[in-house]
Amino acid sequence: MIATDAAVHPYPSGDSSLRRMAIAARELGFDSMVAVGAAAEEEIDGVRVLRGVVLSSGNLREVMGQIRKTGDGSAIIMVNAGDYSFNRAILQMRGVHIIRHIERTHKKSFDHIMARMAADRAVAIDIDLNPIIHSRGPPRQKVLQRYRDIMRLHSRYGFFVTISSNAYSVLGQRSVRDVVLLCSLFGMEEENAREALATLGKMRSGRRAVEVVP
Amino acid sequence: MRDKRRYVLAKIEPPWEEVDPKELYHAIHEAFTSLFGDTRASEAMVAVVDCRDGHAIARCTRGCETLLQIAMLTVHTVDGRRVALRTRATSGTMLALKRRIIDYPRSCTVQARTLEIDGDFYDAHQYQGQKVDVIAKGFKKQELLFLTEKELEMKNHAATGIPDGI
C-alpha cells in the first residue's frame, strides 16, 4: 500500500457509497483507504478497502471494552484523542493503531513524552485534512499550529503519522497531489507527506525499523 | 509593465453542476484571502477567466500558482452548492488549458435521467460509465447521493430508496 487515505466515511454516515468512494480514491491516486464502518476488508476496483473502527468515547473503560470487542486484528482501530491522561493511557493500550483529532484537544495533551511513547509503541498520529478544507479563520489557524507542533515532534521522535481526508462525501476526498499541497501549509515536506500516506501499509506489513540495541 | 500570468485548470465536481463564473471567483478569492491574507491576494490578482464543460480556468500572477492551487482545494461550496475543485494542470497560456478541456468531456459526458426507486422518481446524472449522482428531494431540502450504476441495479431497496449493501 503506497498511498492510503486513513479515514473516509461512506454511506450511511456520509452521502457516498463505499464503491463510489473507492472509485474516487483510485482516480485520485490512492491504492487503499480506511472506510469507517465498513463490514469487512475487501478490494473494490483496484482499491484495498480496510475496515476502520473509530472509538470516540472519552471513557477509558469503554474504549478498552470496545477494543476487546473489535480487536480481531483485521480492523484499523482509531481512537479520538482526549486530555493528557487519557491520551497517555491510550498509548499504553494494546490494539490501538491511530490516535486522531489531536488538533481538537488542548495543546499540552500531546507532548514530547507521548511522542516518544507513540514511536515506541508504533501508534500513529492522524493528520485530518477536513478542518483545513472546511474551517476558516482562527479555528483553522489553531489546527495548522497544532499540526506544525506535531510535525516538529515527529521529526524529533519519528513516530508514525497518517493523513486522512476524513471525507463524508466524494466531494471531500482529495488527491495525493492535493494532500501534498495541503500539508505544505503546516510545513510538511512532500517526502514526509508521501511517507505518511504509506504509513498504514508499513504498519500492516509489520515491518519495523531495525533498532540497534547497545 | 504587464506581469507574467499563470493559468490553473480545475475540474468541477459534480460535473453536471452549473457554476456561475462570478460566484466561483468569489469562492476562490475568499478561500485565497482566508488562507494567505489580503497582501498575498493583492499580489496574486486571482481571476476566473473561463468556466464551462465542468472545468474552470483561474488566473494569477507568476509565482502564485501553487498558492492558487491550494486555495482552490479549500473551496467546498459555490453559491451555497457543494462542489469540489480538482486542479489538473498549470500553464502559461490559456490555449494549452483550453485544448485539455476539449479532450476531457468525451470521457465525462453527463446524461440526465429520471430513476424510479420503490415507486418514487428521482433526478439522476450518470457520467463516466458507472457514476450516478441521485438527487433525492425531501420535504425540507434536497439530498445528494453519490452512487454507482452497480448499486442501482441491485434489486433490494431500503425504505429510503437507497439500495441495500452500499
Image (cartoon, rainbow, N blue to C red):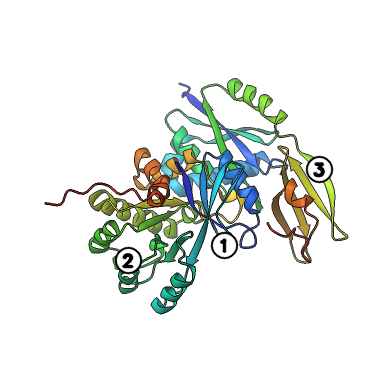
Seen from the viewer's position, the closer of residues B77 and A95 is A95
Q: On residue B112, which mark appears?
A: 3
Q: Amino acid at mark 2?
A: Leu
Which residue sits at x=36%, y=56%?
Answer: A124
Which residue sits at x=77%, y=58%?
Answer: B136
Considering the numbered disc 1 on the image, is that residue within a helix, a strand or a loop? loop
Q: CA distance from mark 3 to mark 1?
A: 31 Å
Determine contact: label 2, label 1, CB under 8 Å.
no
Q: Position of residue A166 (x, y in %)?
A: 51, 55
| Identity of the residue furthest to the front in this view | A72
Q: Is residue A96 above or below residue B24?
A: below
Q: Chain of mark 1?
A: A
User: For mark 2, what is the residue?
Assistant: A91
2 or 1: tag closer to the N-terminus: 1
Q: CA distance from mark 2 to mark 1?
A: 23 Å
Considering the numbered disc 2 on the image, is that residue within a helix, a strand or a loop? helix
* Quarter of image, res A8: bottom right
Q: Position of residue A137 (x, y in %)?
A: 45, 56
Q: On residue A37, which mark appears?
A: 1
Which residue sits at x=76%, y=42%?
Answer: B126
Observer able to see residue B77 = no
